[in-house]
Amino acid sequence: MTGRKSMIGLSPLALGSGAIGTSSYSIASLLPAVSQRLSVSPAAGGQLVTVFALACAVSCPAVAMVASVKGWDRRRLVLGALVIAGLGNACCALASTPASMFAARILTALGSAVYVPAATSLAATRSAPHRSARAIAVVLSGLSASLLLGIPATSSGMNLLHGDQGVFWSITALCLISAGVIAAFVPSSEHPTRLGTTAPKERRTSRVGGQSMLVLAVTLLATLATFMVYTYITLILAVPSADGMPMVILLSAYGVGAVAGTLLGGRAADRWHPAWVVLVATAMSAIVLLLLGWVIRIPASPVVVALVLTGWGCACWAIYSPLSAWLSTPVLMSFNTAAVYAGMAIGGLLGGVVVAETDPSTLVPVAAAAALAASCVVVVARPRSPVPE
C-alpha cells in the first residue's frame, strides 16, 4: 500500500476521533441548556467539564495497562470505546438529575479515554515506521476538526434538534456510525501479545521512566496553557478589537489552525525528531499567546485577531502527534492522553481562579508562561544527540 493510500485508509479512525472530540468538547456549548434542564446553576453545570477530564485522566492509563497485560486487540478497543461513548451520550440525553448526568459523563469519559491512545497506536502499527507520526496526525486531525465543525454544529443545532437532548442523541448516532465504518473498512492486522511476551526493549520503553515523565510534563503544561485560555476565550475576546466579527468565525479561525497544526506537526515529526518539533511548537505557542494579549488591547482589526487565533491554534495543536510519536508505545501513549485531560481540567480550574480575581485578559500572559515552561522542559528531555534524528 502506498503512503498516500495508507493515510486515506486511516480516515475511518479520524472519523471516530471526530465523534469522540465532539462528544468531549461540545458540552461547553451545551452547558446553559443542560443547566436549565437539570435546574442547576451554570457554575455547578460547569463541573461536568472537570469531572469528564478527571475521569479520562484516571481511566486512560488504567485501561491501557490492563489491555497490554491481557493482550487486547486495539481494533476491538477502538470499536468498544466508540460504543461506550455512544452509550454515555445516550445516558446524557436521558439524564433527569444532576447525579445521573455526572454518571453519564463519566461513562462517556471512559470511551473517550480508551479511544484516543488505542486509535493512534493502531494507526502507527498500520503505517511504515517513517510515516508513523503522520499516521497519528491523521487520526488526531479528527479531534481538531471537531473544534472546527462539531462544536459549532452542536451549538447551532440545538434549535433544530429540540434542545441539548437532541444533540446528545445525534452524538450517540455519530459514535455508532463511526464504529460501523471502522468495523467495515479497518481490518485487524495485528497479533495481540501479552506484556510478558513482548520484547525486552519494548517492555523497557513502556515504563514511565525519567525522560517519559518529562515528556508527560510537557504535555501537561502545554495543554494547561491551551485550555486555560480556550475555556474562557469568549470572555477574553469580548473586547473592542473583536467587534464586528461573529464569535463563531473567530472560534472557527482557531479550529482551522488546529487542523493545520495537527497535520503539519505529524509531517514534521516524521522528518525530524519529535522533540525538536515540540520545542518549536511550544515556543511558538508562547509567542503567539503574547501576540494575542497585545492585539486584544489595541484597536486591531478583527481580521488580525482571527489570524492570530489561527496561528495560535496551529502552534498549540502541532505538539500532540509528535508527542505521541516520541513516546511510541501504547501504554506511554495512554499516559500522554491522561496528561492531556489532566491539563484540560487543571487549566480550566486555574483559569476560573484567575477570572474570578482579575480581568480575563490576564489569562493570556499566564498561559504564555506555561507554554514557555513546557519549552524549557523539552530542552531538558530532548535527545542528547547533536543532530536531530
Image (cartoon, rainbow, N blue to C red):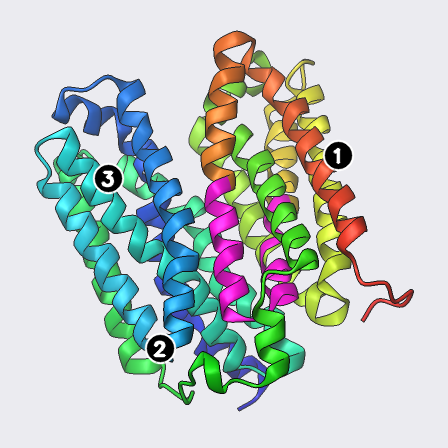
- Look at 37% across and 71% down and name the residue there: 67
Estimate the x, y position of residue 310 in percent, counting from the top left: 60, 40
- Look at 86% across and 63% down and name the residue there: 384
Splitting the image into 4 quarters, where does residue 376 fall? top right
- Look at 53% across and 75% down and name the residue there: 124
The residue that disc 2 covers is 70
Q: Magenta segment range?
A: 316-342
Mark 2 residue element: helix
- Residue type, numbered disc 1: Ile
The residue that disc 3 covers is 157
How far apart marks 3 and 1 lie (CA) works out to: 35 Å
Q: Quadrant of the C terminus?
A: bottom right
Bin the neighbour count of mark 1 within 10 Å (Cα to Cα): few under 14, some 14-19, many 20 and up.
some
How far apart marks 3 and 2 lie (CA) works out to: 42 Å
The residue that disc 1 covers is 287
- Residue type, numbered disc 3: Gly
